[in-house]
Amino acid sequence: MQTERLLKLADFLEQLPDKKFNINYIVYKRRETCVSVACAIGWMPAVFKELKWEGYDSIVWPDNEELNSIKYNKNFAVARVFFDIDVNLCNYLFDNGQIGYSTTKHVTKRIRKVVKLYRTTH
């Protein structure tokens, strides 16, 4: 698990106004290189310069050819590989499906909890 990367994303999200966060969309509002509303995964290129926005609804990791060939759920695949986490943990951290409405506070709390647990067991 890439704990430092996860914590860097959490630090960024904590500074993000709630009106700029929507867990239901990877990228909700975007113009050229400027994103105004996104989820945690959608904000990753703003935090990590090795990632890029592609089109108006997805992110890519240009240096990872295997990931760039994925057609479906590419955004979650990038997050899984980038943070070195499995699909279940990725869904727990970044998906709204099982946890109801989420704000940046909810997501950052989950990230910090998972990192703390990982560090105490590894």
Image (cartoon, rainbow, N blue to C red):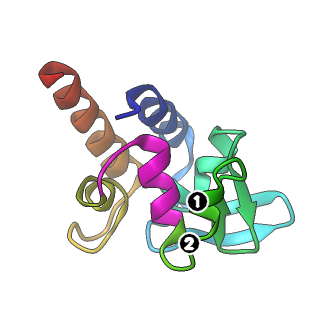
Disc 2 residue crowd, few under 14, some 14–19, many 20+, Cα 10 Å = few
Left or right, residue 71 beside residue 120? right
- For residue 70, the mark is 2
Q: Quadrant of the C terminus?
A: top left
Left or right, residue 107 beside residue 37? left
The quarter holding residue 28 reads bottom right
Q: Which residues are magenta?
A: 75-86
Q: Report the residue marked by disc 1.
A: 66
Helix, strand or loop at disc 1? Answer: helix
In percent of width and height, residue 40 lies at: 49, 54
Q: Main secondary structure of the magenta part?
A: helix
| Residue for point 29% across, 41% down | 109
Residue closest to the eye, 78 or 45: 78
In percent of width and height, residue 82 lies at: 50, 45
Residue type at mark 1? Glu
Are the residues tagged 1 and 2 within 8 Å (C-beta)? yes
Q: Is residue 5 above or below residue 56?
A: above
The quarter holding residue 71 reads bottom right
- For residue 26, the mark is none
Q: Quadrant of the N terminus?
A: top left
Q: Is residue 91 above or below residue 117?
A: below
* Residue 80 sits inside the magenta stretch: yes
The quarter holding residue 117 reads top left
In percent of width and height, residue 74 lies at: 53, 69
Disc 1 residue crowd, few under 14, some 14–19, many 20+, Cα 10 Å = few
* Residue 5 sits inside the magenta stretch: no
Residue type at mark 2? Ile
| Residue for point 72% across, 60% down | 53
